[in-house]
Amino acid sequence: MFEGPRYLTAFGPKRVPHCFTDVLILGGGLAGLRAALAADSRLSVTVVTKEDLRSSSSQWAQGGIAGVVDPEDRFDNHVADTLTAGGGLCHEDVVDSVVREAPGRIAELIAWGTKFDERDGTLELGREGGHSHHRIVHALGDATGREVMRAVIQQTRTLENLEVWPDTFTIDLLTFEGICRGALVWNKSHGKTLIWAKRTILATGGAGQLYRESTNPEGASGDGMALAWRAGVELRDMEFMQFHPTVLYIAGGGRSLITEAVRGAGAYLVDRDGERFMPHFDPRAELAPRDIVSRAITDVMHRTHHSNVYLDLSHLDSATVRRRFPGMLQICGKFGLDLTRDRIPVRPGAHYMIGGATVDAVGRTSLPGLFAAGEVTSSGLHGANRLASNSLLEGLVYGARAGRAASDEALSEQRADAFGVPLLSNAKAVEANGSLDLNDIRNSLRSLMWRHVGVERTGTSLLEAREAVEGWCRYVLPQQFADPPGWQLQNMLEVARLMIQSAIHRRETRGVHVRSDFPETSDAWRVHITWRQGSGQADTTKPTLEPLVPRASRAVGLPEPIAVSQND
């Protein structure tokens, strides 16, 4: 297995500008901004985001936020639904604590000015796949993320201790003597900059752009997972990419997500002949969890030799559909489709990365000085399949926890050299090959991941994918590029091979991970597959909420997986 570099580019303390902050937050989505709001006001806080604050996956979220706010609902119901969807890999203590925190986080958003949809003066609650009750708060019909981010961004503007660096690419985490000390970043104005921090919070989002068919924005390319991996952070459950079952599939159109709430409102899934099929796959029909619906759609597409299936809302009240889903009505209208009358072509697309950096109850990673929150993490909440509308909830809860815990540690930092500049540097290596067509490699990778590491996988196809990605890694990873397109491609390759290797290792079908050559779920595989550079030992201890044990960081190649913490 080819060994990638520890740092992607050359730098030195005398050649690169320096910046100092107490708490550095990498990522400007909901988890990152919620962490900033939780930080102590006595500390300086810097948020670095690859684009601007309105370009994160949080902004794109349609469905809503799950929480027990209806007197007819119970915390135990939400916990049970999450555990059922999670395929036996959720941590029940994590699920219980997050579910119980949900109503307070929703109330907090309302206090900050979030305008959730109401009916007759009370919150209008939706229901989505896998939920036993109506418990999804939503805004602007089907644009919850946009409204939540508007309110949260507005709230962050009241913070005098916060500085935001937009259009800034994080190249690598800086580590010294086994501790995260900040990050190396780049933007067009300053070039490379070393940002030194007492504590760093990783909130960079997911990796959906590794796939040709994806609901994710351009920036969701797995950068945070890759830079965490290079810094020696433990990663977990990398085989679990969730595919959303209903992505608008129209030639020439972007792959727009059609929110789960459409099926929650009563839409049917039908095949090319107009026949409804979900009742044949699951008694919950269209309200089954996403993994089951995605698998059913894939099966029907194979059986009918058709490139997609269809959503049918024609039997629903058209006025209700227009009021509830104005965003989807507008998107479909651009292609001459009437959401209230026409069958809407859909198929699965990469949607949410369940695996990521292993974190404890307050977002600590295995690397001292580094916290993480949101989609870049594996917290134990989602197990092997995320329940609909639990993602924004996780970002809120863990963002708040990580922000508080990181600032508490930063305040207690007594080392005299807390802001000292270690003599960190990385020498020039192989200069970028100008003849490389980065877009071609990127497109080839995304197509390969869709074909071989998609909704269904086999050992043979996964081995073929691994061979191709390893070949690209050999001549792409050693090169030192000068700007984000090259670094982003290197990150995508690193994350792709971790995902492929994890999928090869898990010889069963569980949650979103479907191996057609191992179609059954096995109790022997009710484990987490964890990866860490420089370690080849297995860890079979039961997951706990205790702080993670720090591990040494060494820049070596991909090891055998350290299988794995049993979830009894």
Image: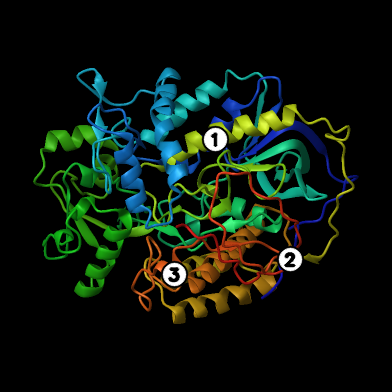
Element marked by disc 2: strand
Disc 2 marks a residue whose amino acid type is Gln
Contact between labelled residues 1 and 3, with CB atoms less than 8 Å apart:
no
Residue at the image point whose x is 48% and y is 76% from the top: 462
Single out the mark in the foreground, 2 or 1: 1
Single out the mark in the foreground, 3 or 2: 3
> Mark 2 or mark 1, which has the lower sequence index?
1
Residue 161 seen in the current view: yes
Seen in the image, is 268 located left or right of residue 97?
A: left
Residue density around tag 2, few if under 14, some if 14–19, many if 20 or more, within 10 Å: many
Location of the N terminus (image quadrant)? bottom right
Q: Position of residue 452 (x, y in %)?
A: 44, 73
**Separation of marks 3 and 2 at Cα, in angstroms:** 41 Å
Q: Which residue position holds label 1? A: 399
Q: Which residue position holds label 3? A: 524
Contact between labelled residues 1 and 2, with CB atoms less than 8 Å apart:
no
Q: Position of residue 105 (x, y in %)?
A: 44, 28
Between 112 and 399, which is closer to the camera in this rendering? Answer: 399
Element marked by disc 3: helix
Q: Which residue position holds label 2? A: 479
Between 475 and 37, which is closer to the camera in this rendering? Answer: 37
Q: Residue furthest bottom?
A: 460
Q: Height in image: 34 above or below 339?
A: above
Q: Which quarter of the figure has residue 53?
A: top right
Q: Which mark is residue 455?
A: none
**Separation of marks 3 and 1 at Cα, in angstroms:** 33 Å
> Mark 3 or mark 1, which has the lower sequence index?
1
Disc 1 marks a residue whose amino acid type is Gly
Disc 3 marks a residue whose amino acid type is Ala
